[in-house]
Every structure is written in structure tokens, then in C-alpha cells.
Image (tube, grey):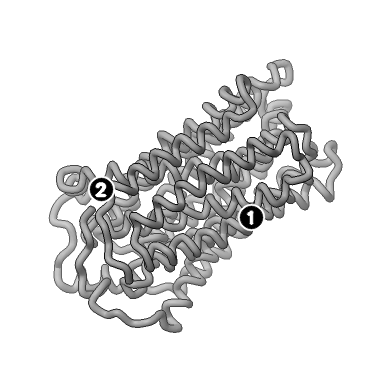
Amino acid sequence: MQTVSSSALSAVQRPLGRSDYKTLALAALGGALEFYDFIIFVFFATVIGQLFFPPEIPDWLRQLQTFGIFAAGYLARPLGGIIMAHFGDLLGRKRMFALSILLMSVPTLLMGLLPTYASIGLAAPIALLALRILQGAAVGGEVPGAWVFVAEHVPAKRIGYACGTLTAGLTAGILLGSLVATAANSLFTQAQLHDYGWRIPFLLGGIFGICSMYLRRWLEETPVFAEMKQKKALAAELPLKTVLREHRLAVLQSMLLTWMLSAGIVVVILLTPPLLQKSLGFDAVTTLQANSLAIVFLTVGCVLAGTLADRFGARRAMFGGGLLLALCSALFYGLLPSHPDWLLPLYALAGLSVGVAGAVPYVMIRAFPPAVRFSGLSFSYNMAYAIFGGLTPILVSLLAKATPLAPAYYVAAVALIGMLTALSLPRQARA
């Protein structure tokens, strides 16, 4: 992969300053609130499936259709990501960073107000699908834009830490969703949850979106983009065209590493709670509590992985992280059926291993030059997530009918692909 050279990005080898920490904190907090909006759907997948699809269909088909709508959000990510990245490379990172919040919070709010199948029939799942697509378009620009934004604000030697911290913020949004779901299942009876309780987390998401919009008013444009604009060094043609013509290897490597990231997040963190409830008989509150613990360890793991990438380089960090992910996921899904009392420590360890996700943006930031960085990162990340992240829930659900170890086999196989990809990355000197 190409190592980026830019005076604003790498010439000044300074420590992180107060403004850097402020940018990281605001970006991470805003990202957490927005990512909450995107993933709260999966924590109420069982209830949503019962409310938005015909009651007479088989339970497995209802779950498959619900996960299909969940997957639609991933399939919509490339379009939103490509469009926002295009203007982010030409008009500025900050503008697109703010726009993505509006496109996320409004659909989330409307989801909380949607009538169910019992009220409007097939129009209910269709409306839910449309809103999920809008959410996907928004997060398609949010995640790559956030990584580019923080990476272009900090010294080159701390890009891994910055990306890991931002990724930790995004995963904190998952934690917030898990905690809200846990609270809802604890405070409401199943009847109350089906009647109105499921709506509250979505309505909260709309409020979180407004908070995120306010937070990002205090952020400034990145020094890298400001310098390119001043020197008239912005992309002379369609940024994506340059990416596909000159950086195909970087795109391929970035997509394969994103596949490993998506396997960890989607399978281990998002899909496991409903799978544990259906396959092993855990109650909703127990699985959500364990999931919250796993996400806490995931958040720590993201920062650790990014820091290790700064210290040892992407090649070592990604290979070691992929190996840990394969081993820990195998232990989790393999031992849990015979040792259900080990749920908390096994899930915590699995969550920590998913933290390899924090090092993936470090690789992608360094893969593309500043003029097309947003477009290159966004295209690679969102295309991979649309293909792999979107199909993963459906594949794992189908495979789980054949073997309860389907999640472990899938994660381990994808982790192996990530490890092989890591070996193709250039060697870097230790910092």
C-alpha cells in the first residue's frame, strides 16, 4: 500500500495537544450517538419481526425477513458513502460530517412512530425498509468521514490511536443501544414492550441526533483539507475515478480487512444476543447484559489495536488481531453450550478480540492520498460492508439451522482471510 506523504499530516511529529483531544472527544461522542441510531434496530429484531410481518408465517422466516431489512441498511451504504465522500473530497470534510447526522436522526425518529402490520398491513414492512435504507445511506458517509476527519487532525505518529479512539466511540454507540435495550426488557413486560416499549429507544435516537448536530458545530475543518484547498490541490477529476484507476490494490486490501471488521462486529456483537436466546435458551436480559460487557471490552480493544498499529505497524497489528479474533470466537461459541455459566468471561474475551476493528481504518487512511482519501476509504469500506456485512446476518441465520457453531466457523474463516491480507501489507519500521 502507498504511504501518504503530506506536510500537514506527517511533517510535524508533535504530541497530541488539547485541541486534538477535543476533536477526538467531540467526534467520538457524536459518532456514538449516531451509531446508536443505526444499530438499535437489531436489539429489537425479535419484537420488530413479530409486529411488522404477518403472524402466520414460520418463526425462522420472520427472523430471516427481519434480518433482511437490517441488511438493507448495509446495502444502502455505498450510495450514501460515495456521494458524501465525493463532496467531502471537493467541498470539505466538516460539511459532510454534519450532513450525515440529519440523514440518520430523522429516519430513526420516524421508525419510532411507524404503525405496525396490524394497522396498515404490508405497508408497515415496506415503510420500515425505506427508513432503514435512508439510515444506511447516512452511516455510509458517517463512519469513513469520521475516520478521515480525526486522522487529518492529529500527528502522523498518532493516527492509529485517533482511529482506534474514534472506532471505540462508534462501538460505544452499540453499547448505548445494548444498555437501552437491556433497560427496556427489564422495565417493561413483554406485553408492554410489544405495545409501546419498543418505540422509546427509536424516539430517543431522534433526540440523540439533535445532540450530535449541536456537538459538531464546535468542530473545525481538517488542516489537511484546508491546506489542499489553499494550494488548489483538490482532485482535478471525479475522485472515485482516480481511486479505481490508480489505487485498485489498496481498494482490494481495504475491502478484505473491512470484511474481517464486519464479521466481528455483525456476528459477535450484533447477532449473538438473539442467537443465544433462540439456540441456547438464555433470557433477553441476561444476553443483553453479557453483550454490554462484551462491548465494553470491544471499546478497550479498539483503542489498544490502534495504539499497537502506531507502535508496530499495520502488518503486525492486523495479523495478530486476526489470529486473536479467530481463537477467541472459537472458544466462545465452542465452549458456551457446555458451560453456560461462562457466558460473561467468554463473551468479554470475544469482545476484546473484535477490537482489531480499531486498526482497520489506520490501514485505509494510509492507503489513499489526501486528495482522494475520503472517496477511496468510503468506497472500499462501504462496498465491503454492503456485500459482506449485508449478507452475513442471512448467511449465519441459515447456517445456524445446520450447526450451532456456524458463527464460529464464519468468523474464523474471515479472520484467516484478514490475516493473509495483513501479510500483503508493506512492512513498517517500528515507531
Say which amino acid is labelled 2: Ala
Which numbered mark, 1 or 2, is in the foreground of this view?
Answer: 2
Answer few, some or many: residues within 10 Å of disc 1's Cα (few below 14, many 20 plus, some between 14 and 19).
many
- Please provide percent x and percent y for residue 226: 26, 72
Badge 1 marks a residue whose secondary structure is helix
Residue drawn at x 69%, y 27% as measured from the top left: 117
Determine which quarter of the picture holds residue 309.
Answer: bottom left
Is residue 200 visible in the rendered image? The answer is: no
Residue drawn at x 65%, y 38% as measured from the top left: 114
Position of 135 relative to 148 (above/below)? above
Residue drawn at x 27%, y 70% as measured from the top left: 224
Identify the residue position indicated by label 1 in the image: 175
Determine which quarter of the picture holds residue 251.
Answer: top left
Label 1 and label 2: CA atoms lie apart by 31 Å
- Please provide percent x and percent y for residue 420: 35, 42
Classify the position of the C terminus by image quarter: bottom left
Identify the residue position indicated by label 2 in the image: 250
